[in-house]
Image: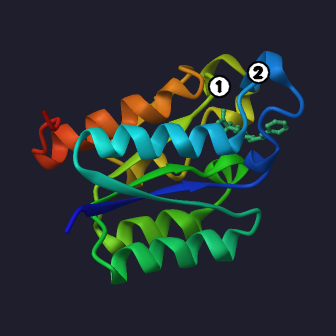
Amino acid sequence: MAKTIYVLNGPNLNLLGTREPETYGHHSLADVEKLCQTAAAHYGLTADCRQSNREGELIEFVHEAGAKKAAGIIINAGGYSHTSIALHDALVGVKIPTVEVHISNIYARERFRHHSFVASAAFATLCGFGIEGYRLAISGLAAKLGVNAKP
Ligand code: CA2
């Protein structure tokens, strides 16, 4: 059976494509999820995509990924990246290879976005590539897992 990776998106990312296009582009969350499913399939992986505006629900998704022994996690925790020790603890606890993604370049923005509690629970962080960052993250995760592209 295909290995599953979890793609988790946090608060407000359900609004992608509806406003702030200069920062987040014109694509919707549905576009991001489709991109992730296609990118995962390229490596014979299945992407299970979830979004929540609630910190606790995101933590439960991480626990579920752990319980189901997911092969990896791609996470854009949105604003919780900069605030949530609880999400950091959940990610550390499940010991699943994790890549953090941000659509925007958080280091070129306000200072309060420069620190991420998710970053130290992830083996890599990508930011500033727009939604292409998700594809790059899946490619990097596949390499980390030793999974090759399917012919
Ligand atoms: O750049 C990213 O991906 C962020 O994780 C997005 C978060 C922000 O708090 C982080 O600092 C960086 C915010 C997501 C808000 O998404 C919206 C998209 C369209 C319209 C409104 C909000």
Q: Is mark 2 within 8 Å of ligand 1?
A: yes
Q: What element does badge 1 sit on?
A: loop
Q: Residue furthest right?
A: 19
Task: Count the labels in the image.
Answer: 2
Q: What element does badge 2 sit on?
A: helix
Give the Cα separation between the discs numbered 2 and 1: 6 Å
Q: Give percent across and percent down for residue 60.
A: 55, 79
Q: Residues within 10 Å of mark 2 (few under 14, many from 20)?
A: few
* Picture disc at residue 23: 2
Q: Is residue 87 above or below residue 35?
A: below
Relative side of 19 to 145, left or right: right
Cβ atoms at labels 2 and 1 below 8 Å apart: yes
Q: Is residue 113 above or below residue 71?
A: above
For the C terminus, the image quarter is: top left
Quadrant containing ligand 1 reads top right
Q: Give percent across and percent down for residue 85.
A: 58, 64
Q: Quadrant of residue 27?
A: top right
Q: Is residue 47 or residue 108 the one in the foreground? A: 47
Q: Which residue is rendered at x = 37% and y = 66% of the image? A: 92
Q: Is mark 1 within 8 Å of ligand 1?
A: yes
Residue corresponding to mark 1: 104
Q: Give percent across and percent down for residue 107.
A: 61, 22
* Picture disc at residue 57: none
Relative side of 133 to 53, left or right: left
Q: How is the image coloured?
A: rainbow
Type of amino acid under label 2: Thr
The disc, 2 or 1, on the residue closer to the chain's N-terminal end is: 2
